[in-house]
Amino acid sequence: MTGVVTLTAAGAIDATYRVGALRRGAFTRAESYTREVSGKGVNVSAALAAGGADTAAVVVLGADDVRFARCGLTAPLLRIVEVPGATRVNTSIIDADGATTKVNAPTPPLSPEAWDATVATLRAELAARTEPWLVISGSLPDLAGAGAPVDLDAVRAVAWEHGARVAVDTSGTALDALLADPAGIDLLTPNVDELAAAVGRPLTSLGDVVSAAREIVERGVGTVLASLGADGLVAVTAERAVFARADAPFVANTAGAGDAALAGYLLGVTREPAAVAVGADALVLAAASAAEWGAHAVAHASTLVAGPPHGIRALVETEPDLTRALSPEGEA
């Protein structure tokens, strides 16, 4: 059956504190605290499952936290690759105004044996599905002793072996390496800062973003889904640019919004043909779904969304105003 397999090579425990105010250097007692298994691919799979999709999340977790992971809401989705020790903890602090301060722990290296086990788990999950998507998501750990991120060539080879389309949401050196050889990447989901770094220049307007995305497409990527933060998002192919934006009912937590938007896009493009109106525009549907799920996620206190977005409708422009300036606050 068709489905989406996500890879989180650097799994995490998300710790979220809600406070009245955050003052640097001062004691603050949290009003609430939650803890959940996370990592970008896990967040994507959680949103996909909330939307009714078949999905599995291959995730590397420390042995100390496996029991906790198997008791959580996402437990049925997880395909855990267990490594020694504790899982890294990523901390979000959300104040009364909805502003999120986030501190991510460093990513520990993976042994060659753990990486081989991760690839083998991916192979098994992809083999169980027909024409699946594979989502490579989040930061990539260094291979122990190599001083460089794990090599994704094996992952791409497994994807091609099983006819999987590949979506990538990563950054830094891992993104640089993929963009140097982007063969087989069907979807790339950078934010504005990541896209600007990839093309080596600042992006201040929607036209700048579309031009930069087209440069990435010319390197061999099928579609670039660029997050504009509070300004929305734009899906760019070689021929088209579709802008979409949806308003959240309120802002509770901006962490995880990009993951939910990616899930929304995939829900749009993997929708059964019978569920799509005759003559419907697939790119428009996918971009609208991405914007709606992203807005839905912002209204959740957790990084994991529960249920599909109800009552949130995206504004879509198939011929957007490319002179539109981007908001200075950056990604939401």
Image: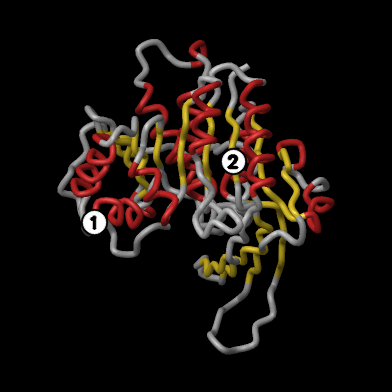
Q: Amino acid at mark 1?
A: Gly
- Position in image of residue 324 (x %, y %): 19, 50
Q: Would you place residue 97 above or below residue 23 in this image?
A: above
- Position in image of residue 227 (x %, y %): 37, 48
Q: Quadrant of the N terminus?
A: top right
- Position in image of residue 133 (x %, y %): 52, 28
Q: Which residue is mark 1?
A: 200
Q: Quick check: marks 1 and 2 in contact, CB under 8 Å?
A: no
Q: Quadrant of the C terminus?
A: bottom left
Question: What element does badge 2 sit on?
Answer: strand
Tell me what residue is drawn at x 52 percent, y 45 percent.
Answer: 137
Please state which of residues 37 and 228 is positioned toward the viewer in this rendering.
Answer: 37
Occupied quadrant, residue 77: top right
Tell me what residue is drawn at x 65 percent, y 38 percent.
Answer: 57
Q: Residue 147 got which mark?
A: none
Q: Which residue is mark 2?
A: 7
The residue lying furthest to the bottom in this view is: 26
Q: Amino acid at mark 2?
A: Leu
- Position in image of residue 183 (x %, y %): 37, 32
Question: What element does badge 1 sit on?
Answer: loop
Tell me what residue is drawn at x 80 percent, y 51 percent.
Answer: 66
